[in-house]
Structures are given as structure tokens and as C-alpha cells.
Image (spheres, helix red, strand yellow):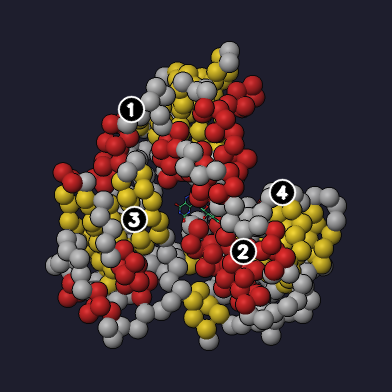
Amino acid sequence: VAGTGNHIIIGNSAAALAAVRAIRQSGDSRPIVLISAENCPAYSPVLTTYYIGGQIERKGMFLVDQGFYNRHQVKTLLGRRVLQVDPDRRRIHLNDRTKLEYGDLLIATGASARELDNVDQDAAGLVCTLRTIEDAERIKGLSQGAAEVVVTGAGLVSLQTIKAVLRPGLRITAVVGSDQVLSQQLDRESAGIIQKKLEAGGVEILFGRGIERVVRRGARAEVVTSYGESLPADLVVVGKGVRSNTGLVRGTSIQTRSGIKVDDQMRTTVPDIYAAGDVAEGENQISGESEVIATWFNAGAQGEVAGLNMAGRQVRRSGQLRENVTTLLGVVVATIGQSRPDYGRYEEIRYVDLRRGVIRKFFFDGPALAGALLIGRLYDAGVIRHCIAGGVDLSAWKSVIAAAPLEFGKILSGQGLEWSYSSN
Ligand SMILES: Cc1cc2nc3c(=O)[nH]c(=O)nc-3n(C[C@H](O)[C@H](O)[C@H](O)COP(=O)(O)OP(=O)(O)OC[C@H]3O[C@@H](n4cnc5c(N)ncnc54)[C@H](O)[C@@H]3O)c2cc1C
């Protein structure tokens, strides 16, 4: 039975919105208070690079307007930060010194961009991470007048930002710690396709280097690499990944690792407290490991499961895996589940046509797919995702799966596929 009293949701993004919808769609009419550190309606961080690049206007980043909160009877406290959760007293403490009591609580505080150490204070105004609308405004402003931009890291956010700011006459240098781009998602061969596109677009990539320091030189910054190079920059974009926003549960019995530990009902280790999205750490169905799966889709699906459980339904999340689809410099890239070879563990079935920029790699764990990497040609991606999540036996299709469109109707008929959650 769900707790009595009000619901409190901390956060105002993918996970929080999905929870609100799920609670109300379940017919639960108890009060909901939603608190967010940012003083604006919910928006998508995914769209920030489209705003920076001028493909959408500022208003295009917002997902809902005030009408959404009214219709769902949500009281919002925007521009207020929760400093501490106090499970013993069933309270939360806000930065304006108010305390609120909850019947149940959803922590959907997401993640923050990791910052660069070693930035001199007077250079900090030219150094930006990208996560929030405010970050996007800064990057947009600084990139407009820039002649040289330095980007650290070559993960998805760094490459999306390069794509957004790239224009003739702007010199962009990427300083990358590893020896390839997108090292979290791709193997070297696949990363080579994206690297070539970047270089063809005029981006210089310096691999195997860290950032020693960022200092101020007149109106500009200077980035000093661990190889001793000095790179002048009008804007430095830092892409060092994200860190879950778990600070508000520090010192409590709510267990954390990288994120707040949750079970498959999004329950934390303390009764009536749930967590969902980039702040939550759950089980990766494919690897069996406990990890934060920091994607928009996962945040929404987890938020929905949390909301349904807060409304008293007994719902479990299943099929949780890493996945992403994006277009980088005209190249479409989809990664689903385990998208990098793990030699000795997975059998790799591949179709590679570098001339056409096509790579399709499938990683089998016995008869079932553990993951896939699709570049340049995405057909069947949706069904492939279902096969991965559902553990479908594809042994009969191994010889043809990489190159040709498959008759997935035949594969799937008779296979019971689980949806992203199941009721019990
Ligand atoms: C440039 C960029 C590109 C991306 N591209 C993709 C992509 O292609 N595909 C994909 O799947 N994902 C992508 N992501 C990741 C995706 O945006 C996140 O996975 C998703 O936003 C997570 O949603 P969330 O609800 O967990 O939290 P977040 O979106 O992180 O939102 C957290 C919310 O909590 C609030 N908050 C935080 N701390 C507090 C506090 N103490 N008190 C009150 N409120 C607080 C914040 O104000 C915010 O409203 C991208 C992200 C970025 C930045």
C-alpha cells in the first residue's frame, strides 16, 4: 500500500515529469510538490546543442509550460534547492531554510557536468561545461565572437558541442585523454569514421593528453596541455562526463555508490524514498552490473516506474540497458546495450563498408544479442533493441544479421518480449 500524505518530487526533468504523469494517470489525486533548483519550466538538456547551433530557438528547449503543472495539479517550487533529505524526520531542507514533510519522496536530481581542475580564477569566465540552459546561453554567447575554441574530451557532449559551434573560420582543437573519440561507446575502427569527419571539418584532435592548466592571457584563455602545448582560446568547453547529484542524501542511511542505489521498483534503501534518472544507480540488465545509465530514455522510464509505485501500483522496471542514437557531423550512430567488443566474452558479427561509411556490429552472448553498434545505416534498430532487451534467441540469424534487413516479423512471432516494465 502506498504511503499516505503528499508526494514530493525533487527535480524537474525527464524522470520528474514521467513520475508526475504516472501518478496522475494512476488516478492518485494526493498533493504533489515539485521542487527544482532552476527557475524555469522543464527543458531537455539533449536539445541544448541544437539551441547553441541555431537549429532551434530558446523556447524550443522547453518540454512543458505552466499549463502542464496546473493540469496535473502540481505545486511547483522553482528556483529552490534542496540541501538535505532527513529520512528520520521524513523532511527535506531547502536553501531558503524552509522544511517540508513528505509522505513519499522521489529524488530526480539528475547529474551535473564534471568540471575541470586547474582553471585560474580569472580564466574561469571563458571555461564552460554543458548541462543546463544557463550553460548553453554562455557557450552560445562566447562562441559567437570566437576565433579559437578548445574542447576537452571527445564524448558525446563534446562532439555535439563541436557540431553546434563549428563554422568556417573558427578554429577548433579537441584535447582528448584517450587515443580515440567516443571511447565509452565505440571501438577504434568505428570511432575512425567520426574522427575523419571531424578532421575533414577542420577540427584538430590532440590525443593522449590531459589539461595541465587554463590561464588568462589578455582577453583570451590559454590552455596548457600535459605535452606542454599552449592553445589560445576564446572559449574552452569542458566535456569530462557527469556526476550524479547525490549530495542531498549525504550522511543519511540512503545508500549511494556512483548514484543512489535503487531496486527495480526505483526504491532506495529507505522506505518511501525513491530515486530515478541520472541520479539513480540500478542494474544494467545486459552486464548485470550496478551502474548509472545516464540517458534521457532511461530517466523517463525509471521516473514512470517510480511514479507508478508511489501511486501504489507494484511495477518493476526491466530491460534497462545503455542506448543512444545521435547524428554527429552527418553520421548517424546508434549504440544499444554492449556496443564495444569485449574480447573473449562476446562473439562479434560484423558488416563493414568503410567506403560508404557503414558499420554494423553485433555482439552475441551465446544465442542472444548483448548489444549492437550501428553507424551509417540504422535499419531495424528498434527491433534489435527489443531483441537485446528481451534476450531473444537469434542464433538462426547470425549469418545474415549484420548485412541485410531482416525479416524481424518471423523472428519475433512466438517470442514473448517484455516491455520496459512489468506489473506483478
Ligand atoms: C548536451 C547534452 C546532450 C545529451 N544527449 C543525449 C542523447 O543524445 N541521448 C540521451 O539519452 N541522453 C542525452 N543526454 C543526457 C540526458 O539529458 C539526461 O540523461 C537526462 O536529462 C536525465 O534526466 P534526469 O531527469 O535524470 O535529470 P536532469 O535532466 O539532470 O535534471 C535534474 C533536475 O533536478 C534539478 N536539481 C538538481 N539538484 C537539485 C537540488 N538539490 N534541489 C532541487 N532541484 C535540483 C535540476 O534543476 C533539474 O531540474 C544529453 C545531455 C546533454 C547535457
The quadrant in which residue 389 appears is bottom left
The residue at 66%/78% (across/down) is 311
**Viewer-nearest residue: 338 or 377:** 377
Q: Amino acid at mark 3?
A: Ala
Q: Amino acid at mark 4?
A: Asn
Disc 2 + disc 4, Cβ < 8 Å: no
Sequence-first tag of 3 and 1: 1
Sequence-first tag of 2 and 4: 2
The residue at 20%/69% (across/down) is 406
Q: Is residue 322 left or right of residue 202?
A: right
3D distance between C-alphas at marks 1 and 2:
40 Å
Tag of residue 39: 4
Category of crowding for the residue at label 3, using alpha-carbon neighbours closer than 10 angstroms: few (below 14), some (14–19), many (at least 20):
many
Q: Amino acid at mark 2?
A: Leu
Tag of residue 202: 1
Sequence-first tag of 4 and 3: 4
Category of crowding for the residue at label 2, using alpha-carbon neighbours closer than 10 angstroms: few (below 14), some (14–19), many (at least 20):
many
Category of crowding for the residue at label 4, using alpha-carbon neighbours closer than 10 angstroms: few (below 14), some (14–19), many (at least 20):
few
Q: Amino acid at mark 1?
A: Gly
3D distance between C-alphas at marks 2 and 4:
16 Å
Disc 2 CB within 8 Å of nearest ligand 1 atom? yes
From the image, state whether disc 4 or disc 3 is nearer to you.
4
Sequence-first tag of 4 and 1: 4
Provide the residue designation for mark 3: 334
**Helix, strand or loop under label 3:** strand
